[in-house]
Image (cartoon, grey):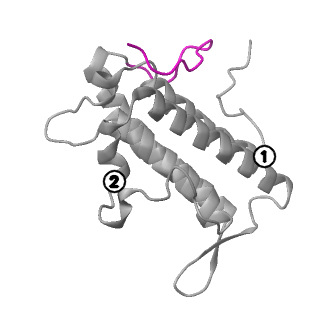
Amino acid sequence: MAEIPWEPPVAGSDVDHLVGALERLRTTFRWKADGLGAEGLNARIGKSSLTIGGLLKHLAANEDYTFTVKFRGESMGDPWVGNGWRDDNDWELTSAVDDKPEELYALWDGAVRRSRACLAAAIADGGLDQPAHITWPDGRHASLRRLVCDLIEEYGRHTGHADLLREAVDGRVGEDPPADWRPIGAQG
């Protein structure tokens, strides 16, 4: 039986399982967001203001914030510098309507690529128990493991949102993409 690249291992180490769970959620989220044009990315359900485009931008920001700011203690840099967060904590969710589909897909894909590289290097250079830059009010530093678990939680919440939004857009349902799926980005 061929291995599905985003399926977590059946048996493996702590690192294998945590990274595998994160990768599965990333892949499922990207599949739910894949191939939509502006209309699909901006579709809403009921009174909710959430959109798949907003979630792409929000999760891209979370990827960069988790590994750049929380883990390494560095500035997020572009494209996040000069954004509207100064006066709006939901800026990335609401401003996505002004972004082209290609920009949203590239933003998320780039953030995930940077995060994967940072996480792989960090695991190779100290593992999940190493302290992150971020501190709690009492001075304790979070571990890299905590940051990965927090990101898994963030993806779990928003992949569920994307699941409902995508079904409303075009009926796409399912827990996992087909085994041969590869991201294609924007359509139409």
Q: Which residue is mark 2?
A: 91
* Corner quadrant of residue 161: top left
What kind of secondary structure does the magenta stretch mostly adopt? Answer: loop
Nearest to the observer: residue 48 or residue 101: 101
Q: Which mark is residue 13?
A: 1
172 versus 127 height, above or below: above
What amino acid type should be assigned to the residue bearing mark 1? Ser
Q: Is residue 6 left or right of residue 151?
A: right
Q: Are marks 2 and 1 in contact (CB under 8 Å)?
A: no
Single out the residue that lies furthest toward the right. Answer: 125
Give the residue drawn at x 43%, y 37%. 159
Q: Which residues are magenta?
A: 173-188
Q: Position of residue 36 (x, y in %)?
A: 39, 20
Q: Is residue 113 left or right of residue 41?
A: right
Mark 1 lies on a secondary structure that is loop
Give the residue drawn at x 63%, y 57%. 67
Nearest to the observer: residue 102 or residue 142: 102
Disc 1 residue crowd, few under 14, some 14–19, many 20+, Cα 10 Å: few
